[in-house]
Amino acid sequence: MDKAPRGASRHVGTVSAWPLAVLGSVDGARVGLPVGSGVRWLDAAALRAAWEAAQRVEAVTPGARPQYLLIDDPTANAFAVRSAQGETIGIHTGMVELLGPDEPAWAALIGHELAHLNLRHSEQRRSRQNETGGIVAVASILLTAVAFPLTPLFAEFATSFTEKGYSRDDERAADEAGIASMRRAGYDPEGAVRFFEKLGGSAQSPRFAFLSTHPDSAERVAAARALADR
C-alpha cells in the first residue's frame, strides 16, 4: 500500500523537508511526498532503512544528537549543519534513490556525517578561514557535505563552501570514524564499501570543485575495504 504522511512537511527556505523519524515509521511499499502540485514517491523500505541506521549508529556514537530531515532535492547528497537551534543532518531524496534499502550503506553515510559534527571539522575550517581573511559562515550555520552538489537551502553561501571544502585529511578522518561507528552499531563494514562505490558511480559532473576536496572514489573504496578487513 502507498501512503502519504500527513502534517510531516515543513518548508526551509525554498526547499521542502520532512522529518525522517516520521517517514521512516511509515508502513507500505511507497511513501508519497507532496511537492508543488504533485507527489514524489519514494521507496518506503529505503526510508525505513535510513531511519533504522540513524538510530542504531547514533546510539553508539557519543556526541551530536541531530534531527534528521529528508530534503526535496534529486542530487545524491547528504549534509550536516550546526546552528544556534541545534544540529541537523539532511538527506536528499536523490540519496534515497541511490542507496535504496541498503541499511549498512545508510549506516556508513550517517556515521560519516556524525563524525564531521563530532570532530568539529566545520568549526576548525571556519576558524582557519577567519584567521586568513577567508569566508565567514552565514548566520552561524555550519555545513558539512558528503558528496556532490549542495542543497539550494544554502545557496547563499554554498559556492564558497564548495570552492574551499574540507581538507582531504578531514574527509579521511570522517570516513574512518564513520566506519568505526557503524561497526560498533553491529553493521558489516562492507556496507561502507558499497556506499562509496555507489557515490563514485553517481558523480554528476567533474566541474564541481567540491569533488577536489575529497579523496577520490577509488581511494575511498580502497580505504573502506582495508578498514572492513581489519
Image: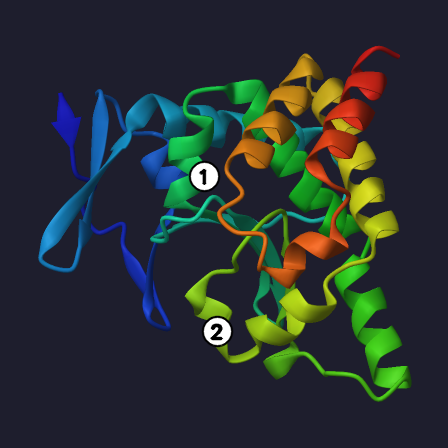
Label annotation for residue 222: none
Q: Is residue 218 above or below residue 18?
A: above
**Mark 1 vs mark 2: which is more N-terminal?**
1
Query: x, y (%) of residue 52?
Result: 50, 25
* Near-viewer residue (12 or 167): 167
Image-quadrant location for residue 4: top left
Q: Is residue 107 above or below residue 207?
A: above
User: Residue 45 or 94: which is nearer the viewer?
Assistant: 94
Proximity of marks 1 and 2: CB atoms separated by less than 8 Å: no
Q: CA distance from mark 1 to mark 2?
A: 19 Å
Pick the residue in front: 167 or 187. 167
The residue sitting at 77% across, 43% down in the picture is: 215
Residue 155: numbered disc: 2
Direction from residue 81 to residue 169 in the image, left or right: right
Query: Which numbered dot is residue 95?
Result: 1
Q: Amino acid at mark 2?
A: Ala
Depicted 25 relative to depicted 80: above or below:
above
